[in-house]
Image (spheres, helix red, strand yellow):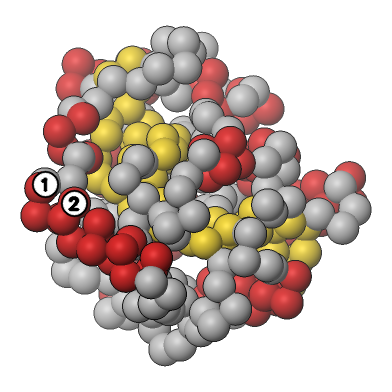
Amino acid sequence: MKIFGLTVLKNEGDIVSQTLTEALAWCDRIAVLDNDSDDDTVARVEAVAAAHPNRIEFIGRYTGAFHNDLRMIPFYRLFDEATTEDWWCRLDGDEFYPHDPKAFLAALSPLECRVNAINLFYEYTDIDWAAWQAKQETLADRQRPIQERRRYYRAAYEELRFMRHHPKLKWCGRAHWPTPRGPLARERIIMQHFRARDPEQLKRRLAIRQVAAERGQRKPDHHWRVAAADWQSQIVDHRSCYYDDHSGTFEYDAHRFSDPPGKRFGQNLRRAAMALGWRT
């Protein structure tokens, strides 16, 4: 079994070296497309690729507006390498897996073809801001693992992150994933999402998304439609979060991420259909 990572980046230079290096522990090949970064993202990707020959495929730059089907470019770059034993992973530049995805996927039934990840959003909290103001943390701390720097998280929602390969997969239009799509696995995998890392990164991220919003590329109520000057509105009270104690266990509302009986019944029907040789 191999796992192929599909990565689209924009201005993730402060974290992408760590993201790619950690992903290579379980990801066999990663295809990377840059979406017109103006920081050192590309240089850092190339450095990791040079240190791991034949593991990272840097495709180049795309200078247009971001849309989710950009991931079809790395998908088709690696498509011919995949077999029915393999998996695709949407690997964003600020996402990490504390538990081995390869072991998780290997334990699934052959009739489970998609895996959702529980997004643990690591927030920038009042405690982090106080430490920054006291100069207990600075930009130099970007050299430290992000898991050490941000410790408070909230479990917001789940998203599809892994899909089993099938030779008939096609990625068309503005779809977020290729089709046909098999049944969703019962179990979810834990994913750490470090979207808020330090004040300078937050300002930069919000500025990029504000431009996208002004061009109509974001919904009016999108959660990142905030001006960079108002970045402090993203600071979260640490008391509203769970604390990552690095024990390897994570707190969240398990009922929020469990399937209701009706959904479980539908998924079981799809698994039964696949057992008869169908794929929808």
Q: Residue at x 62, y 66 (%)?
A: 84
Residue 121 coordinates in the image, percent (x, y): 34, 37
Of residues 166 and 202, the one nearer the viewer is 166
Q: Would you say 7 lies left or right of 48 here?
A: left
**Quadrant of res 7:** bottom right
Q: Residues within 10 Å of mark 1 (few under 14, many from 20)?
A: few
Q: Would you say 273 lies left or right of 36 here?
A: left
Quick one: which residue is furthest to the front in this view?
276
**Can you tell which of label 2 and label 1 is closer to the viewer?**
2
For the residues labelled 2 and 1, say whether their Cβ atoms are less than 8 Å apart: yes
Q: Would you say 27 lies left or right of 130 here?
A: right
Q: Is residue 133 visible?
A: no
Q: As shown in the figure, which amino acid type bears the numbered disc 1?
A: Pro
Q: How many marks?
A: 2
- For the residues marked 2 and 1, what is the alpha-carbon distance in whole angstroms? 6 Å
The residue tagged with tag 2: helix, strand or loop? Answer: helix
Residue 275 coordinates in the image, percent (x, y): 39, 65
Q: Is residue 63 visible?
A: yes
Q: Which residue is mark 1?
A: 260
Quadrant of image for the C terminus: bottom left
Q: Residue at x 25, y 45 (%)?
A: 157
The residue tagged with tag 1: helix, strand or loop? Answer: loop
Q: Residues within 10 Å of mark 2 (few under 14, many from 20)?
A: some
**Quadrant of res 80:** bottom right
Of residues 76 and 168, the one nearer the viewer is 168
Residue 35 coordinates in the image, percent (x, y): 58, 70
Q: Which residue is mark 2?
A: 264
Q: Residue at x 64, y 79 (%)?
A: 76
Q: Residue at x 18, y 28 (%)?
A: 253
Residue 15 coordinates in the image, percent (x, y): 61, 41
**Quadrant of res 74:** bottom right
